[in-house]
Amino acid sequence: MSPRRLRWIMRSVLYGTLALLAAAVLAMRQPDDLATNTISGRTSQGNAFEIATRTNGSVVGFATLIRTRCSAGDTQHVSWSPGDGAPVPFERRGDRLRVREEWERWSEGYEERGWAVLEGKVADDGRSVTGTIDVEQTFTRGDNWWSTCRAKGVRVDGGGS
């Protein structure tokens, strides 16, 4: 399979996953004291950044798409949509938020290993999140390295006045 076809297959899966998560985030309903707000924002790459927060200021999930640059000169898109707790813990210290997720995927003879990190700041009322995202993916076929793709310091800005 050509790298171009593999890329389109991966994009289709990733975009579909992002759409499903965004729908799930919008559908979440909690009691009034833990009501969920969905806040829209953007990344410095121009992609949507959707955040689900509670009225107590906690972030419960987000969804975005990050464009990475690969060692072979091409680009990949990573759909990232973690939810707090399972499978990813959201670490909070005051207004600071840190989210890290790692993954392994296999598709048609290729293995992808990757990670993504969000380092951010959450407003007290949970109405905005700002920060940066770093992503790295490594693709291998069998025992042979194929490509590494990275994005560093992608700014996110969601919500605000």
Image (cartoon, rainbow, N blue to C red):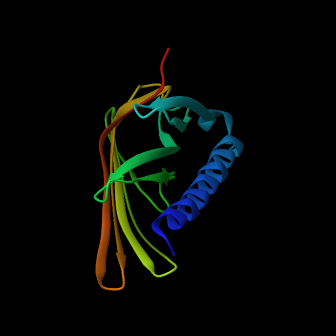
- The foreground one among 23 and 59 is 23
Residue that sits furthest to the bottom in the current view? 142
- Rendered image quadrant of residue 152: top left
- The foreground one among 80 and 37 is 80
Residue 41 x, y percent position in the rendering: 51, 29
From this viewpoint, is residue 61 visible?
no
Residue 55 x, y percent position in the rendering: 56, 31
- The foreground one among 96 and 147 is 147
Please tell me how many numbered marks the rendered image carries: 0
Q: Residue at coordinates 58% horizontally, 64% vertically from top-left?
A: 9
Q: Residue at coordinates 55% horizontally, 57% vertically from top-left?
A: 11
Please say if 69 is above or below 130.
below
Please say if 128 is above or below 67.
above
Please say if 124 is above or below 141.
above
From this viewpoint, is residue 31 visible?
yes
Residue 77 x, y percent position in the rendering: 46, 52
Q: Residue at coordinates 47% horizontally, 62% vertically from top-left?
A: 87
- The foreground one among 16 and 158 is 16
Residue 10 x, y percent position in the rendering: 53, 62
- Rendered image quadrant of residue 70: bottom left
